[in-house]
Image (spheres, grey):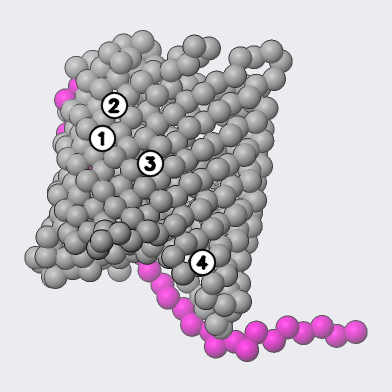
């Protein structure tokens, strides 16, 4: 018996790479952070392969300065089947469909780092994912296992069911996008929540729960909203985690969120309302820049286990050299009341990034 598969292959390749170099200055009232530090935040190489109109694949690896150890790690590797423009099926390692900030590529973000509330999400998982695109809405559903990404994630995440829904609404020239996410996870008995203060150059976390044991299940809820008109954008999210524990251990509940307002000059920020994620910015060479402000918080206080509370206020200026390359400048004031050690701490950060894509 013979078996053959004809893909009608017209194979094409697209190779890309991205590097981000950061430099940060710290002013810490507890003298934990250094005066200054630098970091190769990302150094990624990706290969997109298109076999025909239905089948394609992607591989991406990252070599970055994580905890002062340069190493290579597979960030994403997946196979996609697209029967038509409205439906896509993925298998492999990829972003899980939860949170606008999480599924949108970091190279399109307003600030150098995601908000501290992103500590309540896990970005990558290995599994399957289905996406349906309507005319002005989308829905994603995925089943995932452990994430073995070696640049900061954990192998304790276990199995998860994740879904995300988004809808575009247009009112009097104003474009709105509203979305909701849900995840149910069965971890491998333990998990940990911790985050840097929206600066990656120095590896210290103001908030850290430590390892949480005897976790039976986790329920994650997310709400997101975006408003866009002309040069202006507002974006906000709220995320909540509920932990159910075994052996008479008390349950836990943590939450976080952020709000961003931004204006771009001599350019156009492009958001795919159909997909529910940010796309490349349309710029005028050497003339496009934007200013942004963000408030974010992460609440790891619970009557059964208090790991601290943090609020951040951030200001950002981005200067676009081209649609792929930009200079980023951020000021961040991070306040904990208290941090995970029970200390009220104020940290001021000035940081810059050169983002290069080719």
Cβ atoms under marks 3 and 4 closer than 8 Å: no
Q: CA separation, marks 3 and 2?
A: 15 Å
Dot 3: what SS? Answer: strand
Q: Residue at x 48, y 46 (%)?
A: 180
Q: Residue at x 15, y 49 (%)?
A: 291
Q: CA separation, marks 2 and 1?
A: 7 Å
Q: Which mark is residue 133?
A: 4
Which stretch did the figure color magenta?
1-28
- Give whichever of discs 3 and 4 has the lower sequence position: 4
**Residue 134 showing in the rendered view:** yes
Horizontal and vertical percent for residue 266? Answer: 11, 65
| Residue neighbourhood size for the residue with mark 2, other residues' Cα within 10 Å, grouped as few (<14), some (14–19), many (≥20) | many
Q: Residue at x 55, y 65 (%)?
A: 132
- Give whichever of discs 1 and 3 has the lower sequence position: 3
Cβ atoms under marks 2 and 4 closer than 8 Å: no
Q: CA separation, marks 4 and 1?
A: 31 Å
- Give whichever of discs 3 and 2 has the lower sequence position: 3
Task: Name the residue that disc number 3 marks.
Answer: 237
Question: Does the stretch in magenta take in 21?
Answer: yes
């Amino acid at each position: 018996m013979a078996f053959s598969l004809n893909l009608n292959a017209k194979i094409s390749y697209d190779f890309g790479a991205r590097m981000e170099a950061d430099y940060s200055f710290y002013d810490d009232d507890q003298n934990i952070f250094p005066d200054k530090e630098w970091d190769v935040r990302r150094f990624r190489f990706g290969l997109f392969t298109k076999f025909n109109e239905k089948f394609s694949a992607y591989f991406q690896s990252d070599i970055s300065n994580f905890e002062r150890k340069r190493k290579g790690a597979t960030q994403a590797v997946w196979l996609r089947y697209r029967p038509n423009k409205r439906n896509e099926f993925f298998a492999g390692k990829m972003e899980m469909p939860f949170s606008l900030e999480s599924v949108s590529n970091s190279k399109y973000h307003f600030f150098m780092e995601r908000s501290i509330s992103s500590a309540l999400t896990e970005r990558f998982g290995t599994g399957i994912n289905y996406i349906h695109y309507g005319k002005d809405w989308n829905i994603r559903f995925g089943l995932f296992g452990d994430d073995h990404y070696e640049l900061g994630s954990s192998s304790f995440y276990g199995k998860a069911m994740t879904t995300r829904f988004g809808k575009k609404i247009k009112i009097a020239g104003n474009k709105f996008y509203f979305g909701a996410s849900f995840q149910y996870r069965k971890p491998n008995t333990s998990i940990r929540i911790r985050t840097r203060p929206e600066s990656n150059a120095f590896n210290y976390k103001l908030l850290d729960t430590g390892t949480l044991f005897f976790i039976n299940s986790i329920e994650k809820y997310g709400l997101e909203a975006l408003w866009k008109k002309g040069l202006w954008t507002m974006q906000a999210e709220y995320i909540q985690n509920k932990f159910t524990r075994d052996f008479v251990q008390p349950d836990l509940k943590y939450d976080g969120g952020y709000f961003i307002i931004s204006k771009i000059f001599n350019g156009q920020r492009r958001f795919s309302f159909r997909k529910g994620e940010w796309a490349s910015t349309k710029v005028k060479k050497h003339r496009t820049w934007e200013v942004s402000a963000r408030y974010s918080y992460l609440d790891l206080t619970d009557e059964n286990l208090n790991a601290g509370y943090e609020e951040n206020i951030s200001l950002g200026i981005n200067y676009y050299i081209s649609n792929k390359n930009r200079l980023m400048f951020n000021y961040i004031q991070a306040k904990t009341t208290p941090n995970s050690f029970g200390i009220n701490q104020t940290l001021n950060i000035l940081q810059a990034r050169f983002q290069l894509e080719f």
